[in-house]
Image: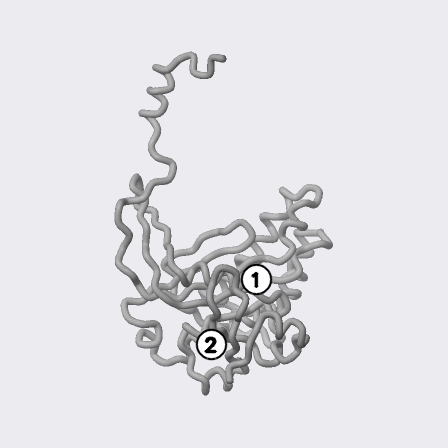
Amino acid sequence: MVTNPNKKNVTKIVESRKDLIKFRQQASPATQALVLTFDLEGFSRFFSQPDVHHYVPRFLNRVFDAVSIIINGGKEYWTPKKIEIVPYLEPVHQKFLGDGALYIWTFKKGIMEYMKNETDIAFFINRIWNLKSNFKNIKKACLDDVPVVDLPQRIRFGVTAGSVYKLTYSNSSHTEYIGYCINLASRLQSYCRELGFIASARIGLPETTLKKHGYMKVIAKNLKGFPEEIVIVDKEEFDELSEEIKDELFDIIK
């Protein structure tokens, strides 16, 4: 059976095309980073509905606008008090992941050394938790231009900190990031559906700050592909979990 009738033409095509994905031979040195990821629970089901091409972009834009507000500042219209919040630091990298996104902030020094004080991070994770907890109000805001009943029910966040490495494409200046903390954030966001917000203790908040803002530390013991990890969760939400879920997913720090 003839599979390649014109070898000369094939050779010309190959020579004329640049590599689709190829990185420079060496990554950047390690940089300290704060990493935020999120995904939308039930997005696949939402995507399978009729006329999805009309509604998915509109819904995603609403969600990304809300996430943009907690990063770039604006009115938290989804919370009861509708507080006007100031901008946070601008991320060095942001990437759409199909049913969510990745955001990365890098620091020349350690995260806590860079911040004026630990409350900068505490206030930022409060914004994330508020958005997660009031996601139903974001869905309500979609009703005018996304007339679909079966929207994603929850938005789920994972927050981590650690070393990242920048990869640069060989044929452009575009970059990507790799690192343990990026993969960990992705695992944390979907680790416990009933919580929907889990941060790694690696973000460095002291116990006094956690208690002040209503958080606590526990051990996530069944992270797929990862060792046990000390994580930060909302105390009230954790206390409301069934004993079965707690026993399966977490250990209490003694």
Q: Please provide percent x and percent y for residue 68.
A: 49, 61
Seen from the viewer's position, the closer of residues 162 and 71 is 162
Seen from the viewer's position, the closer of residues 212 and 85 is 212
**Which structural element holds mark 1?**
loop
Alpha carbons under labels 2 and 1: distance apart: 22 Å
Residue beneath the point at 71% across and 54% down: 150
Q: Please provide percent x and percent y for residue 4.
A: 43, 16
Mark 1 Cα within 10 Å, few/some/many (few <14, many 20+)?
many
Above or below, 195 relative to 52: below
Residue beneath the point at 49% across and 13% down: 1
Q: Please provide percent x and percent y for residue 151.
A: 67, 55
The answer to the question of whether label 2 and label 1 lie on touching residues, with beta carbons closer than 8 A, is no
In this rendering, position of residue 41 left or right of residue 215: right
Task: Identify residue for label 2.
Answer: 123
Above or below, 224 relative to 49: below
Task: Identify residue for label 1.
Answer: 190
Q: Nearer the viewer, mark 2 or mark 1?
A: 1
**Which structural element holds mark 2?**
helix
Tell me the kind of residue under disc 2.
Answer: Phe
In this rendering, position of residue 7 left or right of residue 49: left
Residue beneath the point at 33% across and 32% down: 18
Mark 2 Cα within 10 Å, few/some/many (few <14, many 20+)?
few
Tell me the kind of residue under disc 1.
Answer: Ser
> Mark on residue 176?
none
Seen from the viewer's position, the closer of residues 92 and 164 is 164
